[in-house]
Amino acid sequence: MLAGAYCRAVEKAGGIPVLLPALAILDRPLHSFCQGLLLSGGGDFDPAFFGEEPHPQLGTVDLERDRWEISLIRKARAEGLPILGICRGIQALNVAFGGTLYQDLPAQYSPAPNRPLLEHNQQIPGDQVSHRVTIVAGSLLSRVIGPTEIWTNSHHHQAVKDPAPDLKVTARSDDGVIEGLEGTGDHFLLGVQWHPERLANPDSQRLFTAFVRACQPLM
C-alpha cells in the first residue's frame, strides 16, 4: 500500500513508476532503465552512516536498504538524474552527501525559546495536515509549489540535523525543524520531510509533476 501511493502520484503526473529491488551491486547505469530517482518514506537510518552510536529511542534499521539507497543517490547524482526524496528520502539524501540526522526529535532537538516542539509524528490520518511549513522564497521548492507557506502532514521522529555541504535548507516548520533540502546546482535535487503522496491538495501533486517533467528531457 505504501508503494501504491507513490506509484499513483507518479502516474498521475504522467510518469511510469519502476520499483527497484535492493541489490548488492548495480553495475548498469541508472539512466539505462529509468530517468529519475524517487526515494520513499520508511524506517530509521542507522546512525553508523553519520558517525554516531545508536540512541535509545532509535527505531528499526535496515542496513541493506541504507547502503542501497546511498549508492543509488550517489549514482543518480553522478549521472545527472533528477532526484526527489520524501520523508526518509530527504534524510537519505542528507546522509548520502555527508550530513547528519537527529535520531529522535523529542529526545535530541530543542527549539528556540518560545517555540515549542511540534508533534512531528501525527496521530491523525495521513491524508490530513497537521502543521505549517515555511518555504524560502526563490528556492526550487517555492517555484514548484507556488506559495511560501503551506500546511503539511507529518510522520517522522528522525530529521535532518546538519545539512550536507552541497545541500541548502529551503523549508522549516514553525519549531525550526528542517522540512526541505535541495541541491546547489542546476539539476533537480529536492527533498521534503512530509508525505505529499498521501495528500490530495494541489501543492502536493505539483511536487510529482515537477519531478516527472524534470525527467522528461532524458527520455
Image (cartoon, rainbow, N blue to C red):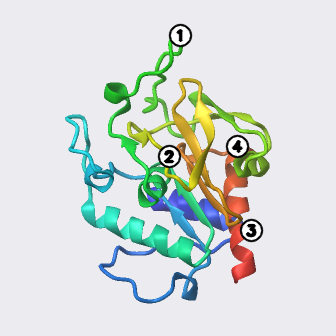
**Amino acid at circle 2:** Pro
* Disc 3 crowd, CA 10 A, few/some/many (<14, 14-19, 20+): some
> SS of the residue at dot 4?
loop
* Residue plotted at (46% across, 31% down): 120
The answer to whether residue 111 is left or right of residue 22 is right
Residue 201, disc: 4
Q: Is residue 65 visible?
A: yes
Quadrant for the N terminus, please.
Answer: bottom left
Q: Which residue is mark 1?
A: 114
> Which label lies toward us, 3 or 4?
3
Closer to the camera, 20 or 100? 100
**Amino acid at circle 3:** Arg
Circle nearer the N terminus (3, 4):
4
Q: CA distance from mark 3 to mark 4?
A: 19 Å
Q: CA distance from mark 1 to mark 4?
A: 31 Å
> SS of the residue at dot 1?
loop
**Amino acid at circle 4:** Asn
Q: CA distance from mark 2 to mark 4?
A: 28 Å
The quadrant in which residue 59 appears is: top left
> Which label lies toward us, 2 or 4?
2
> SS of the residue at dot 2?
loop
Q: Is residue 18 visible?
A: no
Q: Which residue is mark 3?
A: 213
